[in-house]
Every structure is written in structure tokens, then in C-alpha cells.
Image (spheres, rainbow, N blue to C red):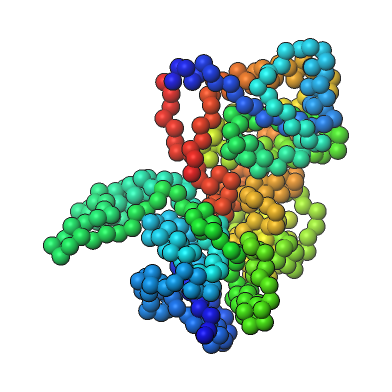
Amino acid sequence: MKPKLALYWASSCGGCEIAVVDTELKILDIAGFFDIVFWPCLMDFKYKDVEAMEDGEITLCLFNGAIRTSENEYMAKLLRAKSKVLVAFGSCASEGCIPALANFYDKQSILDFVYKDSQSLEENSRGVYPETKTHMPEGEIEIPELWNTVRTLDQVVDVDYYVPGCPPQSFQIVKVVEAVIDILKNGKPLPPKGTILGAGDKTCCDECPRERKEKKIKKFYRPQEIIPDPNECLLDQGLMCMGPATRSGCDALCVKANIGCRGCYGPPVNVMDQGTKMVSALSSVIDSTDQKEVREIIKTIADPLGTFYRFSMGASLMRRVQPKKVEKE
Amino acid sequence: MEQEEKEFNPKIVAFLCNWCTYTGADLAGVSRLKSSPCVRIIRVMCSGRVDPSFVIKAFKQGADGVFIGGCHIGDCHYSEGNYKTLRRVEFMKIFLEEFGIDPRRLRLEWISASEGDKYAATTLDFEKQIRELGPIQLVEV
């Protein structure tokens, strides 16, 4: 009996599915070793097929995507019950990733913008909001409820392992799958619960080939403002690079392509909040001891909160922006 | 509502640097100066040790105000630690504002070991400010 594998996408972009398929010929090994029993992106299994399974019947479930709708939550709980090992696969499930940027707003303001205020709305549908239940002559149609706060997978169910990255790099996925096959074939022990797989235990800077000197930053530049030197550290040149506050594992892809690291592999080891860690790192290298000058230098960073928490808002300490308070009289 | 305001006793977490502000606070105590009873002191070796995440963690765990006390600029016991504190607090003011926490709840002061009176006066002033701002009341996610 082949071990059973499931892959599911909650609030996600599909990039993780592509990353798995990008393992190219390895996908044949995966399909050969495992019995893939659920993979909405590529296979025609239905939710009721999962509901009909025994608890723990799925050996391994790679769950990507953040939890922002009632459907996402339902499937997270269902797949947790039916799976022996549940992996938060990719940045969305591990830290919230791009969907968690919705936590800078709230459900009502998002719905208002999309269905009422957006300039690109058809005039006759402006102000028409979706309903979770709609009565039609044929019966009642239901769509999932949108939650106010986007959550990570482990904020909803118990997670066994994490594979970070947006998406996890294919060569890392190959390593993880090979390790899993090794464990299942040869009866090796599982790694400790909560282990982060498919990534390193240093920062992106460790994998970066650029030359790093002592940093003295007087100004930050947007990527289009300067042409970076290909050999010098991007942060040295004043270009934003999340390398110092990002876990290694991707082989510094982005910096090798002349653009600053975005932070998609999440916070480094033992760091609970990626955004404040970046604040800490940058505060060490901003070259000024005068409060006013420091303030001006910080102003040259476009959207620091969004930039430093671009991938990790869901798993950050604050997790969301506080709702606007009504001013006391 | 009114009863809650009567009972509101601000919780202020203070990260004080060992060499200057903490010693200044000690001097205030020994000199029997009145300083705020709302302050809960955490001694750090340098104000530069205060990771920005400590500030957020303090607010999340119920602090109504966070106070960071360090050596005067140019006098850091470790030469440059307080420059980093200065920069971190500038960032954190922006972050707190965007997160929806009033940035006045975070205060940075340079207080030396001999400024016991400044420590006492600053804590009392900060307590007054926090009382005006009210309890933090973070919305639980």
C-alpha cells in the first residue's frame, strides 16, 4: 500500500503548486512513491472524497495558502483530522505572506473598496455586495464567509512542520520529499515537531555572493533610482534588501538577479517577528547620530511597515493593524 | 465607564540601561524622591539591547506605556549603543502609529546616573501622559 499524499491550496496564488511541478522529473518519483489522493489544482478529487477518508489515512499533507475564509478554515480542520503529518507549505501557510497584507485593513473597508469605491466598477453594479447566502429558483447558493483577519495555518490547527518560501524553491522541495521518502522507506525517526524543513538556519546574507563592507547608509534608494553595482552588497548601496532578517535556503536568488531580497523565506532562526528584526538591523547601519537626520533617512524608505512585514504579517507579534478608534470627545 | 477610569492604574514597562538610567533610578530611590509607582523596571546592560520587538511584546502583554532609559548621547557606556536605540525608537514611532497604537505610549529619555531627580520627574510625567491616553485596550485578534 503506497503512502497517501495530499496537497491543498487555501488563500494562495498557485505558486506553490507550480513549484512542486517545477521539480520536473522528480514529480514522477513523487507520483510513483505516493498515492496522490487529493490535489485540487491538478487532480479531480472532491472534498467529499476527503470527508470519506479515515482519520490519519493521509500520510502526508502539504497545505499551502493562508486561512482567510470559512472554507479555508474548514479544509484546514478537515485535512488536519485526516492527515498523519500536516505541513504548512510555503509562506502563506507559514507566515501569512501576501494575503496577510489584508491585515493592514479590515473586512469592511476591503469590501467597500472592491464593491463600492473602486474606479473600475461598472456603475450599475456599484454598491452590490456579495452575500454568503443567495436564494435562486433552483435552491440556495452559499459562498464562504470572509474572516476579518488573515491567519496562518498554525493559528487554526496543529501543524507538524513548515516549509517556508514564496514559493519554496523547487530544489528544496526535492530535498524535503527525498527526506520524507527516506523516512518512510527506511523507518528513520521523524524530525522534532515544528521543524522548519527545506531551509537553512542562517540568513540570506550567508548565501549571498556579494562583497560586504562596513555599512554606512545615509539614504535609501528605490530600485529604479540607481543602477546597482553587481558585486557590492545591495544594502551597502542603499537599496532595500531584507537579507539580514530573512532565513537562508533559497540560494539568494533575488540578489543574484540584482534586486534586494524581499524576505519571502520568513524570519531567521529564533526570531519571532521579522519586521522588528529588520528595524533592528537597519538601525545598526544607518549612518547618523542626529535625531532629525535619522528621521529624514528613514523617510527615504517607502512604506517601511509594508516592506518589512510583506511576507510575515500573519505570524508577526501584532498580526494585524488595530481598528481605527473613534476619537473621544 | 467612570468607575473603570477611577480604577485605571497604568502599567508602564521601563527598560533601563544598567550604567546610567537604572543607577539614576536607584539614586532617586535612595534619595527618597517620589517617582511613579506604575513603572516596572527591566534592567538591560545598554539601551541598545532593547530589541524593537520587546516594545511590541510589552504592549501585547498589557503594558499601557513603554519607557526606554539610556545614557546621554555621546556618553554611552559601550560608545555607540544608544545611537542604535535612537534610530530604533524613530522607526518604532512610525510602526506604532501605523499599527494603531498611539506613539506617545513609547518614550525614550537619556537619564544619567546622577539624575535621580530627572528620573523621578520623567516617570511621573509619563504616568500622567498615560493616564490621559487611557488603557491601551488592544483588540484581540
Where on the picture, by quarter, is residue A323?
top left
B37 displayed left or right of A264: right
Q: Is residue A219 above or below residue A44?
A: above
A180 displayed left or right of A21: right
Q: Is residue A196 visible?
A: yes
Considering every residue shown, the one lying at the far front of the view is: A54
Q: Position of residue A288 (x, y in %)?
A: 74, 40
Pick whichever, A233 or B130, lies toward us: B130
The structure residue drawn at horizontal position 31% and vertical position 56%, both measured from the top left corner, is A120
Q: Position of residue B53 (x, y in %)?
A: 65, 43
Q: Is residue A132 above or below residue A44?
A: above
Where on the picture, by quarter, is residue B47?
top right
Q: Position of residue B73 (x, y in %)?
A: 79, 31
Q: Is residue A178 visible?
A: no
The structure residue drawn at horizontal position 29% and vertical position 48%, both measured from the top left corner, is A116
Pick whichever, A109 or A137, lies toward us: A137
Q: Is residue A41 above or below residue B18?
A: below
For the image, the number of numbered tags is 0
Q: Is residue B127 above or below residue B80?
A: above
Question: Where does the C terminus of chain A fall, quadrant-wise?
Answer: top left
A98 displayed left or right of A222: left
Where on the picture, by quarter, is residue A262?
bottom right
The structure residue drawn at horizontal position 72% and vertical position 63%, both measured from the top left corner, is A201
Considering every residue shown, the one lying at the far left of the view is: A137
Q: Position of residue B22 (x, y in %)?
A: 80, 27
Pick whichever, A14 or B36, lies toward us: B36
Pick whichever, A236 or B82, lies toward us: B82
The structure residue drawn at horizontal position 24% and vertical position 51%, both measured from the top left corner, is A128
